[in-house]
Every structure is written in structure tokens, then in C-alpha cells.
Image: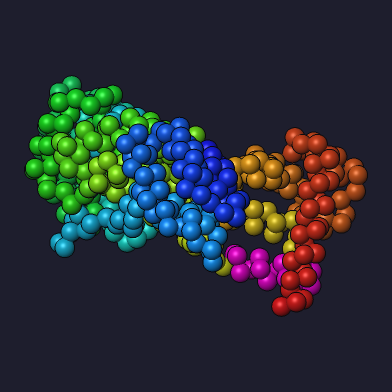
Amino acid sequence: MFSILSERLAAALKQLTGRGVLTEDDVREGLREVRRVLLEADVAFEVARRFTERVRERAVGVVALKAVSPGQQLVKIVYDELVTLLGERAALLTFASLPPTVVLLVGLQGSGKTTTAAKLAQRLKREQKAPFLVAADVYRPAAEEQLRQLGTRIEVPVYGPAEYAGEREGGSGKRNAEEGQHFPLPASRFPNPPDVVALVQAGLVAAEHARARTVLVDTAGRLQLDQDMMQELVRLKQAVQPQEVLLVADGMTGQDAVRIAQGFHEAVGVTGVVLTKLDGDARGGAALSLFAVTGAPIKYVGVGERLDALEPFDPARMAGRILQRGDVVGLVERAQQAVDVGEAERLQRKATSKRGMDLADFLSALKQVQSMGPIESLVGMLPGMNAKLLQKANADPRRIKHVEAIVLAMTPEERQRPDILNGSRRARIARGAGRTVQEVNLLLKQFEQMRKLMKGFGRRA
């Protein structure tokens, strides 16, 4: 996430932090480079200009300081201004005093709106907010069915055109939605799409009968901003009075995301933003521009394709990651959500015991790490880590798959007793895993080193 922006911004600031004395000319020249980096990352021109101007004004008194390194002070000022640019403090969802809380998800087609609806529903379910999904995209044939499949995976009820038609034909649709069942009829069955406002209102009634606490409405998107779409959203907002209108914006669209956000904000009053696809090669400019341009805070970011890959957005922690200070708090939170505590405690006892871990335990630990997300995103949350260090460490996610294949190619006895792995056994394992004997040997060597290290920790404890 933001790897290119982070690397280039760190390089620009390093020219200043490496000097014992800073002049005003040094600061001016360094900030010119910072502005260039921001513009290359797709930050809006006016936002980048105002940012560097604020940093320059605050840095005027820093260059005269002797007690504290002026370069480090300047980095602190850049960090503080980045936090301000990103929204200052984390913004949470607003919940209704009397459930259900209604959340409209709006955005262009292809921004990841339907998937985001399911991700947010899973997160709210984990927080005991009893989510309920309404498929209100009656124009894209696959939208309803996609939301149904995602709803089935996370075990959250879905209400859509099929249930709405069932109610009008005899009442069975509402009962199915209340019971958390999914009526398996695609939206294409209906040659004349139902009125979206009436559909969502019926979905809210079904949600109340199902005792849902939050209702997520997946609205229709278009390939571009158009008047018809906006008028439909305006009518829908007036009819259901949602607590939140979340814009789902593609983080890879750069400055276009800012233009799109402005269009939606002017029409329906966006209360927050969900930025998707930040795990790709997004340059980060959208995240740095959205709050400054619209005043709508970023509330969540999508950091992967998995349904649990949605994180609350915290400006201070994100600024720390951009400046390579890491995000240890975020790393701990991710571990708490993904790791099996009982299994982790068992592995800890085993690792520090006299016998130590075996390869079966090693595989279990590997799966625990995998459950936390892509390895490159975990390493990126450690202080001081950047894209170049990641490449030097060879933290290729495919290597974990290769290690898993090698361990799974062993027999249960071989995993428990790695010392019996002679040359012929290693050759058989390499063939079974589709890897080389050298890779098998390297894995066993690294495993033995790790086992000795863990046993040493146990003796010292």
C-alpha cells in the first residue's frame, strides 16, 4: 500500500534529514521535491501546493533550532501535516439510536461496490451489528446474483428483486428474507426492473422483521457520472433517510477519484469514503486528496480480495506507514482478528519445550501467518520497512506456497522427525512438491536454525 509514494517521499526527506544544518533555501528546495513526488502520486495540484506551503510556514523556525536535529523536526512537521491532510482522526460509522441503521453504498460501476458491501457486512457481523444486505442494483444482471453468493459465504441475509417480486406475487419473498434465505432468481427474470425506492423500502421492512441492526444498500453504478443515476440516488436518500452515504471509490483511478467524489458529494452529500484496491499499484494520490477536496472522511480501505480485507482508516497510522514509521497497532489488531489464540499458545509451548517444534507445527504456524493476509502487507506495517527492503528480503508470497507444498509432500512421520530425511527421501519430497532438492535442503536448514533459536528463548525464559 502506497509503496511507490512512500519510497519516493522518504528519499526526498532523506536529503534533508542527513544534514546537520538546514538553511531556508535547503527547506525550499527539499519541499519542491516533495511537491513533485506528491504530484507524481496523483495528488490534486492545489492540495499538493497548499500542503507544501503549510509545511514551509511551520518549518521557518525549525532551521534555527540547535537542540534538536532540524531535519528530524521537519519530518515531524511533514508527518503532522499528512495526518491533517488525511482527516486528522479516525471517523467511525454513525449508528441510529433506534435500529436499523441504514447505509447507502454509492459509486461508479467497477469500483468494487458489491464486494465492499459484503466485506462491510462481514465486519459488522463480527462487531455484533446484525447486518442485512439489500441488492438495489436492478440494472446490472449479475449484481444481484453476485451479492447473493457473497451473502451466502458470510451467512448474511440478502433482499433483492426476487424477494420483492415474491412479495407482490404472494408474500413468500419477505418470509425468505426474514429467515436469512436467498431466493435463487436472477434479476434478469424481470424484463421491467422494479422501482428502486419501493424495492429498498420493502427491504427495510424485511430487515426490521429479521431484527437487523444495520442495513447495507448496494445501489446501482454507472460507467460515468450521469444525471439519471444521481436523481435516482437523490430520491432514494430522501425516501429512506440513511445515517450514512458511503462513496466506494477505486484507489487506482488517481485524480479521477477526486472528481467522482465531488460529483457524488454535491448530489447526495457523501458522509464517508471507502477506498478500494489499495493493495494494488495505487499511487496513493486519491487518499491524500479526497478529504481535503470534499471534507468527507475516508472510513475504510480495501486491502485485498478476501472478504475480511477491509480495514478502518486511521489518518495517524496511515501517515506513519507512508513515512515508513510502520503500523504496529494495525499489525496487532490484524493478528487478534485472524490468529487462533489456542493454537498460537500451543505452538509457543511446543517451540520453547525441550523437544521443540516439528515440521507439522511449522506448517500450522505458517497457516496462522497466511490468515493475517499477504506477507508483503504485513512486512509493510513494520517500522523502517520499504519496498526496496522487501525486495532484498525476497518476501515473495509464492515462496510460502512453495514451503507449504514441500511440507505437505512429506509423510506424517517425516514432519515429526525431520532427522530421518536422507537423500532419497528429500528427492522424493522435491518431486512430490514440484520443487528442487536444493529448496528442500534450504527449508530444512532454515527450520533447524529457527527451532534452535526458539528452544534458546525457552531456556532463557
Q: Residue furthest top?
A: 191
Q: Is residue 331 left or right of residue 209?
A: right
Total numbered badges shown on the rendered structure: 0
Name the quadrant of the C terminus: bottom right
User: Residue 105 at x, y = what percent?
Assistant: 25, 41
Q: Is residue 27 left or right of residue 48?
A: right
Residue 187 seen in this snapshot: no
Q: Is residue 348 magenta?
A: yes
Reply above or below: 119 against 145: below
User: Residue 253 at x, y = what percent?
Assistant: 38, 30
Which residue: 78% across, 48% down?
443
Q: Residue furthest bottom?
A: 461
Reply above or below: 99 against 245: below
Q: Residue furthest right?
A: 423
Reply above or below: 321 against 438: below
User: Residue 220 at x, y = what percent?
Assistant: 23, 32
User: Residue 230 at x, y = what percent?
Assistant: 16, 31
Q: Quadrant of residue 276?
A: top left
Which residue: 82% across, 52% down?
445
Q: Quadrant of residue 88?
A: bottom left
Nearest the viewer among 407 and 82 is 82
Which residue: 28% across, 53% down?
131
Which residues fall within the magenta stretch?
343-356
| Prevalent SS, magenta region | helix
Q: Is residue 330 magenta?
A: no
Which residue: 29% across, 57% down?
92
Q: Quadrant of residue 186?
A: top left
Residue 423 seen in this snapshot: yes
Nearest the viewer among 425 and 440 is 440
What is the basis of the colouring in this image?
A: rainbow
